[in-house]
Amino acid sequence: MKHSSTLPLMPPTPLAMFDIWKAGQMAFELWSTSLSTITLRNHLWQTQPFFSPKMMKENQRMVTEKLEASMEAGLEMQKMLFNSMNGQVAPWWITSQRAMKPYHQRSSANSRRLAK
C-alpha cells in the first residue's frame, strides 16, 4: 500500500481551521476594500480634471501599487513553488494568505486614504 504525501484538503487541527477562517476573512476584506477604492477613485475621475497634478499623481500611484503588489505576490508564489520542489509543501490556507497579503495591504490602505 502506497503512502500518500499530499496535504489534506480540510485542516486536521482547530488551529488550521482558524487559518482557513483568516484566509476567508482576508479575501472578504480584500473584496470589500477593492470595491470601495474603485468607487472612490471613480468619483475622483468624475469630479476632477484628469490632467490636474493631484489626479496625475493618484493615477501613477495606482499603477505603481498594482505592479508592486503583483510582483510581491508572484515572488511569494515562486517561493512556494520552490519550497514544494524541495518537499516543504504548505497547505492551501497558508499559501492563499501569503499570496493575498500584498493586495490586501494596499487595498486596505488605499480605501482608508481615499475615504478621508
Image: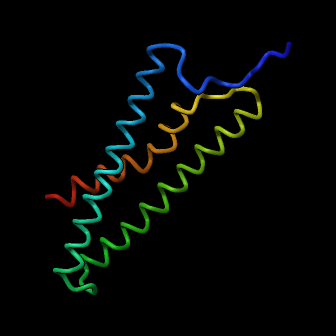
Position of 58 relative to 84 (above/below): below
Residue 67 position, x and y percent, is: 49, 62
Rendered location of residue 103, percent (x, y): 42, 51
Which residue is at a point 70% across and 33% down the rendered structure image?
83
Q: Considering only vertical position in the picture, is 63 above or below 93?
A: below
Where the N terminus falls, by quadrant?
A: top right
| Horizontal side, residue 107 vs residue 115: left or right | right
Q: How is the image coloured?
A: rainbow
Q: Quadrant of residue 88?
A: top right
Q: Please give left or right for residue 42 compared with residue 93 in the image.
A: left
Task: Assign the C terminus to one quadrant of the image.
Answer: bottom left
Q: Residue sitting at 55 percent across and 36 percent down? A: 95
Q: Determine which quarter of the picture holds residue 21.
A: top left
> Left or right: 96 with respect to 41?
right
Residue 2 is left or right of residue 94, and the answer is right
Question: x%, y% of residue 50?
Answer: 27, 84
Residue 37, compared with residue 55, is above or below; it is above
